């Protein structure tokens, strides 16, 4: 469900202790995509990994998605997470997100994109080598 602004959306801080609404909100207008199943999976993966998920991008409204050159079909128009790789063991991270049902994975040099869209994966420019190590 989409909320016009993240401050209007419900949030259960006990259920998702390591995340907050604002980090998933559209950076341009604050629009928020509420998906309990998504937050549960993300929290479960975060708990298993035991390290912060530095979330660089969550939801984008269609305007913002267009402005940043996102694909028209981007899962960021719903919700997706770009986890900074800093301080993470890449293998642990990837196995945790797969275990909790993230089906879309984009491998980049500095972050891992995850979403619950169609099962697929891709590599960002030059990232194949980063992820082969
Ligand atoms: Zn926006």
Image (spheres, grey):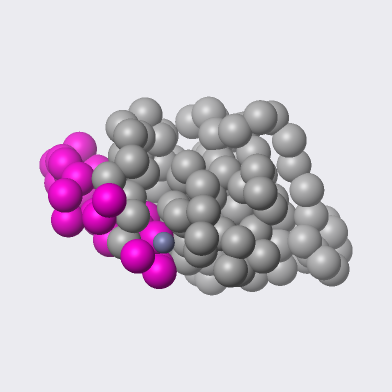
Residue drawn at (41%, 41%), measured in percent from left and top? 42
Query: Considering depth in this image, is 34 or 88 the residue closer to the camera?
Result: 34
Quarter location, residue 126: bottom right
Instruction: Measuring from the top left, give residue 87's x and y in whole percent.
Output: 51, 68
Q: Residue at x 49, y 31 (%)?
A: 100
Horizontal relation, residue 20 to residue 61: left or right: left
User: Quarter of the image containing the N terminus?
Assistant: top left
What kind of secondary structure does the magenta stretch mostly adopt? loop
Q: Nearer the viewer, residue 129 or 115?
A: 115
Left or right of 129: which side holds 94?
left
Direction front: furthest residue: 63
| Residue 81 in view | no
Count of numbered tags: 0
Give the residue drawn at x 51%, y 60%: 63
Residue 42 belongs to the span the image colors magenta: no
Dividing the picture into quadrants, the one containing residue 129 is bottom right
Q: Is residue 118 left or right of residue 23?
A: right
Does the magenta portion include 25? yes
Quarter of the C terminus within the rendering: bottom right
Q: Is residue 120 visible?
A: yes
Vertical placement of residue 118 versus 9, above or below: above
Relative to the observer, which residue lies in front, 10 or 130?
A: 10
Question: Which region of the structure is painted magenta?
Answer: 4-29
For the point 66% across and 49% down, the residue is 72
x then y, percent, for residue 94: 61, 45
Where's residue 120, x and y in %? Answer: 73, 35
Image quarter for ligand 1: bottom left
Relative image position of residue 24 (x, y in whole percent): 36, 55
Quick check: 121 left or right of 25?
A: right
């Amino acid at each position: 469900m989409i909320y016009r602004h993240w401050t209007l959306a419900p949030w259960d801080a006990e259920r998702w202790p390591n995340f907050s609404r604002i980090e998933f909100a559209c950076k341009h207008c604050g629009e928020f995509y509420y998906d309990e199943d998504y937050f549960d999976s993300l929290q479960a993966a975060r708990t298993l990994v035991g390290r912060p998920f530095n979330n660089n991008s969550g939801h984008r409204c269609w305007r913002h998605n267009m402005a940043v050159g996102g694909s028209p079909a981007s899962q960021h128009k719903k919700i997706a997470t770009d986890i900074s790789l800093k301080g993470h063991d890449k293998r642990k991270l990837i196995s945790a997100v797969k275990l909790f049902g993230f089906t879309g994975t984009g491998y980049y040099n500095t972050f891992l994109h995850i979403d619950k869209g169609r099962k697929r994966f891709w590599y960002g420019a030059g990232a194949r080598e980063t992820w082969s190590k």
